[in-house]
Amino acid sequence: MRKRKLIRETSSFRDPSGFVFYLGNTIYRQVNISYKNDYLYFKNSGLYKKLVVEKLLIPFREVSDFKYENSEAFVILKTENIPFISYPYEWCFEQLKDAALCTLQIQRLCLEASVSLKDASAFNIQFLKGRPIMIDILSFERYKEGSPWVAYLQFCQQFLGPLLLMSKVDSRLGTLSGIYLDGIPLDFTSRLLPKYTFLNFPILAHIHLHSHNQTKYGRNPSQVRLKRKALTKNMLLGIIDNLENLIQSIKYSDDPTEWGKYSNMMNYTKAAFENKKKIVKSYLVRQKPKNVWDLGANTGEFSRIAASLGIATISLDSDHSAVNNNYLQVKQNGEMNILPLLMDLANPTTDLGWAHKERKSLLSRGPSDLAMALALVHHLCISKNIPFSMIASYLAKICKSLIIEFVPKEDSKVQILLRSRKDIFPWYNQETFEVEFSKYFRIVKRNPIGNNSLRIVYLMERKK
Amino acid sequence: MYLTVFLLFSFLFILPDSTYAYLDPGTGSYITQLMIGFIAGGLYLLKVYWQKIVSIFRILFRKPRMTDEKKKTNKRN
């Protein structure tokens, strides 16, 4: 019997079927007695095994070495750890699309086994080894013939709506998911979508008609008399099939953005670039971090150096096209150590949800063993007016060691940033950079990338 | 296209009212599933049966594969 303190996951309070808790770094899930019958049916029906074999659901096993703190507990489950929890508003278009298809595939297999998803929240999907996977074991309930899919509205609000808005209007609308944590309201999606989408049957049905019915019948449901068992399983399978076809047909509107093809717009020679790669690799080999956060990763060129060394790497960038390209590479090459995510370092994800505790900020998901900030500091300093001291103090909070590149004012990229504005950065030089960073970090190594470039790469360790 | 026109006529001319604070999220969603389900369920059945028909025709009209023994006999000939 263990006596260490159990810590309950702050976001796990909505579902009366159970909750998630931690013991050290291990994740457990309590199944409550109220969920007993659904749990046993799901576990013994063969569906669980099928979903695990298909890599759609995180595997679990029952453990018996806990003293239950309350009488509600039926069983405790232990699941595999997710190295980094990410949220739908941090995913690019293709990630959200794959997560949506994963959810629909699960619901289809569920219906075939007379089970149904009672919850289709995008927060129940995480990315593990490059693939989306369902992590909520308590989302399954026995299907009753004639009953609707209770999570249909949630699916449309959390997956379909954001995907359509990103595809048909603007990819930046994906960030709306960070404002509407329960999903973008359908009437809002319906209003934002172009009028021509009324001529597309699936969009008309799942968004516009759905939104209309929400308003019309939601206001006065007592006037509606529903015929029991009118909705057959075949009709539900038809809806799932229709949603799958629609989502598969939605394409990312590939506007060529500034960073989408970053590696093609470098201002230094291939030799300097190769040398920079060599320096970064040697630092990573020296530090042997368990995980790396690549800040301003673009399409993940340098993240792949860390990933190739077997290091779990989070590849963060604020440009949607770059993150999308990065994820497509992960998919294409079957890369298991890279997780590309959308993140604006000047406005990183904050604590969100009920009491600011449901969804975690970037800061509280750290610190990382090592962060890479390559070709980033000049953007933060000159485009965002953030002084060295503030960058150094923030980076010291999110990483234990740091690989950072200093791009001097003479560099053509810095000159471009300064071209149309007054140079109010007399402090932007190598000496001040080192002085300010030395307040938080110990400079371990310093290597110019050479080959006619004045850029310098540093390896630093956080001061204790 | 006909399905789209049908759905458009079924509701488009009734403009949605303003949003209310107390909304039942289930009923509208259920009715939508019923409306879509009739069409999507029918299409799904057609798709499943069509796949079955295609597979039967494939079995009936596929070229007979030569077994290894036949190949050997042919070579001898």
Image (cartoon, coloured by chain):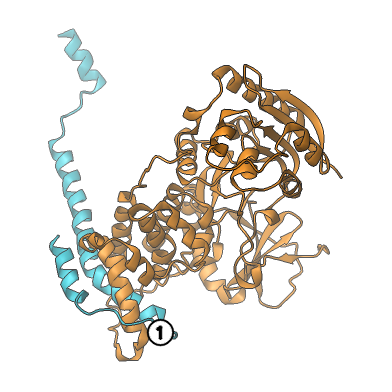
Point out the image quarter for the N terminus of chain A: bottom right
> What amino acid type is highlighted by mark number 1?
Tyr
Answer left or right for B30 relative to A460.
left
Answer left or right for B74 relative to A331.
left
Residue B38: x and y, percent?
22, 69
Dot 1 crowding, Cα within 10 Å, few <14, some 14–19, many 20+: few
Q: Is the residue A133 above or below the residue A354 in the image?
A: above
In this rendered view, identify the residue nearer to me: A105 or A360.
A360
Residue A3 in sight from this viewpoint:
yes
Instruction: Examine the image and state in which quarter residue A447 appears.
Output: top right
Residue A204: x and y, percent?
25, 65
The residue under the point 67% across, 60% down is: A28
The residue under the point 38% across, 62% down is: A161
In the rendered structure, the colour chosen for chain B is: cyan
Q: Residue furthest right?
A: A464
The numbered mark 1 sits on a residue in which chain?
B
Answer left or right for A389 relative to A154.
right
The residue pinned by badge 1 equals B20
Helix, strand or loop at label 1? It is: loop
Residue A108: x and y, percent?
37, 59
Q: Is the residue B26 above or below the residue A383 in the image?
A: below
In the rendered structure, the colour chosen for chain A is: orange
Answer left or right for A271 relative to A403.
left
Point out the image quarter for the C terminus of chain A: top right
Residue A44 in sight from this viewpoint:
no
The residue under the point 21% across, 49% down is: B51
Q: Residue furthest top?
A: B76
Q: Residue furthest front?
A: A422
**Number of numbered markers:** 1
The residue under the point 49% across, 67% down is: A180
In this rendered view, identify the residue nearer to me: A21 or A359.
A359
Residue A33: x and y, percent?
61, 75
